[in-house]
Image: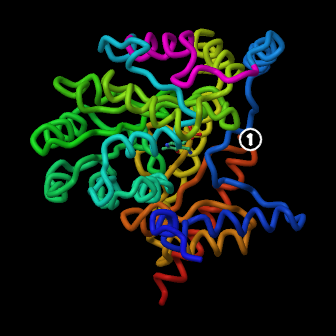
Amino acid sequence: MELSKRITQITGGSDGWEVFNRARRMLNEGHAVTELTIGEHDVRTDPSILHAMDLSARNGHTGYATVPGTDLLRDTVAARVQSRTGIPTTRNNVLITPGGQSALFAAHMAVCDPGDTGLFLDPYYATYPGTIRGAGAIARAVRTAAEDAFQPRADLIDAAAEGAVSLLINTPNNPTGVVYSRQSLEAIADVCQRRDLWLISDEVYDTQIWEGEHLSARALPGMADRTLVIGSMSKSHAMTGSRCGWIVGPEYVIRHLIDLATHTTYGVPGFIQDAASFALTAGHELENKIAAPFRRRRSLAINVLAAQNTVGLVPAQGSMYLMLDVRATGLTGEEFANALLDTHAIAVMPGESFGKAAAGHIRVAMTVDDEKFVSALRTLCAFSAQLAKRHAAE
Ligand code: PMP
């Protein structure tokens, strides 16, 4: 039986998770593997959030919740977004979704017709092209470059914009750890307005800023009417398994997105939403507590990397990842990641899993305890130095 092109073309074969899957198999077979692959915190959801979840469920919030999200959570998200951006935002600008991933899909469903082109920036979070294709659109990559410290270039976006209807960006960025500068975002806003593009702005790492400040593109002049912001509880509150995120955008877009949600997800469990409302109003302390290990490990990593000169560090300004340049070893990111796994049982993601622009790089998730993390990084650097020496002698 034939399946739809829409579903068979989502990944186009390889999904970039091969090294990750191999590491998982090794772990299941009983090998000790240091896992620096996916963006999963090494702490679980805070007990105070679980308490709020439990209380809500016991109070009966286990039935169908209203599809757009509870008034409480929509109001809470609106107030948070307004206080961070200065842009007037009400619950009518907010749809609660089962995680940021389904928000990314819904946003593309809202703005792309089948056959339309959606732009995204390379390197990219692994699901991006598949999400755009899943919505029936053509996914077109625009490169950012190591030479530009992976800041997006408006001239390249402009050159790719012919026939496109949307642009997907992500700051703080997964996989690079780069925070887009005001200058980059203003230039993007300018292209979007000139080329009449929707901007889908994935800001799920907005509480993980180590250098500079997070700027939401929705806050830039003229952008609130054409920007859909993607948010999530996953990274800010270590609630990856709770599947709770949102889209913030113009009211009429949200109205249509509610139709989509009614016919797809039918909302998010009420007790999860109550837990999210609690977490978002619990103050910055809770967010800071969850971000702190990554901030600390990033500093530790900078120290380890300062003591060698084989591995390059892409400016680590935000998010829970470091992007390392391993081109001096003469290996591709994929070859390097496989060799590191085989030789030292350390699992990292090859840059190539995130697109062509990250070739020769690897992404390291800062998601194991400090001691293990530093030791893995030291091993990685020593291994790179050996490989680089051998490569130079070839
Ligand atoms: N966007 C980015 C950039 C991500 O890294 C992730 C998850 N790793 C998501 C969206 C989706 O997160 P979730 O669905 O858990 O909210």
Quadrant that contains the N terminus: bottom right
Residue 4 vs residue 179: left or right?
A: right
Q: Residue at 64% across / 21% down in the picture?
A: 65
Give the percent coordinates (x, y) of residue 102.
52, 41
Q: Amino acid at mark 1?
A: Asp
Ligand 1 shows up in the quarter that is top right
Residue 187 vs residue 272: left or right?
A: left
In this picture, which residue range is highlighted in magenta?
Answer: 62-82
Residue 202 vs residue 367: left or right?
A: left
Q: Which residue is mark 1?
A: 369
Q: How is the image coloured?
A: rainbow
Residue 186 seen in render: yes
Give the percent coordinates (x, y) of residue 13.
53, 74
Mark 1: give few (<14), some (14-19) or many (20+) Cα within 10 Å.
few
Give the percent coordinates (x, y) of residue 157.
20, 53
Q: Residue at 54% across / 83% down in the picture?
A: 390
Give the percent coordinates (x, y) of residue 129.
42, 58
Residue 141 vs residue 269: left or right?
A: left
Does the closest atom of ligand 1 sit within 8 Å of the Cβ of label 1? Answer: no
Q: Residue furthest right?
A: 30
Q: Is residue 276 magenta?
A: no
Q: Quadrant of residue 214?
A: top left
Q: Nearer the viewer, residue 260 or 334?
A: 260
Q: Is residue 73 magenta?
A: yes
